[in-house]
Image (tube, rainbow, N blue to C red):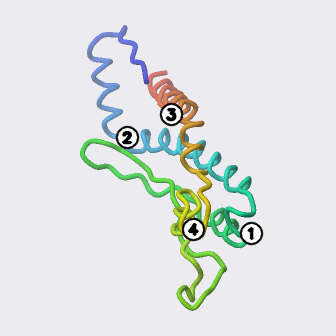
C-alpha cells in the first residue's frame, strides 16, 4: 500500500491529492502493468515447460505468441488489466482455416478436455506470483508518490 506522510500542513497535503487526481489513471496504470508483467512472465515460463502430451510444439508457440496484457479498464471504481490469449496458432484445420484459437487451446490445456489431459499453467503462475506482483505494484505507487512529493 502507498503511504502518505503529512507533515507540511494540510494545504500541502491537499495540493498533493489534487495533483494525484489529475494523473491517477496513468500512475495506477503503470503500477498495475508492472504487477501484471510479473504474472505474465510466470505464465510464459510455465508454457515453455509444458510437457509434449499437453500440447504440440505449434500450439505451444501459438500460446507464447498470443499471450498478452490487455489495456487497462476502469469499471465500478476499480482499475484492472487482463492477461490472456489472442489470435490463432499455425495449426490450420477444416474447422479452423485461420488456425486454432489460442484462447481455446489455453482453456483446453489448463482444464483438460475429453481428448487432452489437464495441465494447469495459468492458475499456478498466478498463485506463485501474487505476493510478488502486489509488492511490485505497491513499490511502483510509492516511487511515483515520492517523485511527486520530493
Q: Does 36 appear above or below 82?
A: above
Mark 4 and mark 1 lie on one chain; the one further toward the N terminus is 1
Residue 99 or 77: which is nearer the viewer? 99
Q: Which residue is mark 3?
A: 137
Give the Cα separation between the discs numbered 1 and 3.
34 Å
Q: Mark 1 against mark 3, which lies toward the viewer?
A: 1
Q: Is residue 20 left or right of residue 77?
A: right
Q: Secondary structure at mark 2?
A: helix
Badge 3: residue crowd in 10 Å (few <14, some 14–19, many ≥20):
many
Q: Residues within 10 Å of mark 2 (few under 14, many from 20)?
A: few
Q: Earlier in the sequence, mark 2 or mark 3?
A: 2
Q: Earlier in the sequence, mark 2 or mark 1?
A: 2
Question: Looking at the image, which residue sits at the far left?
Answer: 76
Q: In the rendered image of this protein, does residue 141 appear above or below residue 23?
A: above
Residue behind mark 1? 57
Question: Is the residue 135 above or below the residue 39 in the image?
Answer: above
Q: Which mark is residue 105?
A: 4
- Residue at which label 2 appears: 23
Task: Calculate the distance from the C-alpha at mark 4 to the C-alpha at mark 1.
Answer: 12 Å
User: Do the residues under discs 2 and 1 have CB atoms within 8 angstroms?
Assistant: no
- Nearer the observer: mark 2 or 3; the answer is 3
Q: Earlier in the sequence, mark 1 or mark 3?
A: 1
Question: Where is residue 75 shown, x and y percent of the image?
Answer: 28, 49
Calculate the distance from the C-alpha at mark 2 to the C-alpha at mark 1. 44 Å
Residue appearing at x 34%, y 25% in the figure: 16
Query: Of the residues tagged 4 and 2, which is closer to the observer?
Result: 4
Amino acid at each position: 500500500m502507498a503511504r502518505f506522510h503529512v507533515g507540511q500542513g494540510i494545504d500541502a497535503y491537499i495540493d498533493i491529492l489534487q495533483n494525484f487526481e489529475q494523473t491517477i489513471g496513468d500512475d495506477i496504470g503503470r503500477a498495475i502493468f508492472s504487477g501484471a508483467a510479473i504474472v505474465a512472465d510466470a505464465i510464459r515460463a510455465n508454457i515453455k515447460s509444458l510437457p509434449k502430451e499437453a500440447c504440440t510444439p505449434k500450439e505451444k508457440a501459438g500460446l507464447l505468441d498470443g499471450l498478452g496484457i490487455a489495456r487497462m479498464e476502469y469499471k465500478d471504481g476499480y482499475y484492472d488489466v487482463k492477461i490472456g490469449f489472442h489470435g490463432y496458432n499455425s495449426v490450420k484445420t477444416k474447422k479452423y482455416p485461420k488456425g486454432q484459437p489460442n484462447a481455446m487451446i489455453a482453456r483446453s490445456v489448463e482444464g483438460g478436455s475429453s481428448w487432452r489431459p489437464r495441465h494447469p499453467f495459468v492458475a499456478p503462475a498466478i498463485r506463485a506470483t501474487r505476493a510478488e506482483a502486489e509488492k511490485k505494484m505497491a513499490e511502483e505507487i510509492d516511487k511515483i508518490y515520492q517523485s511527486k512529493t520530493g
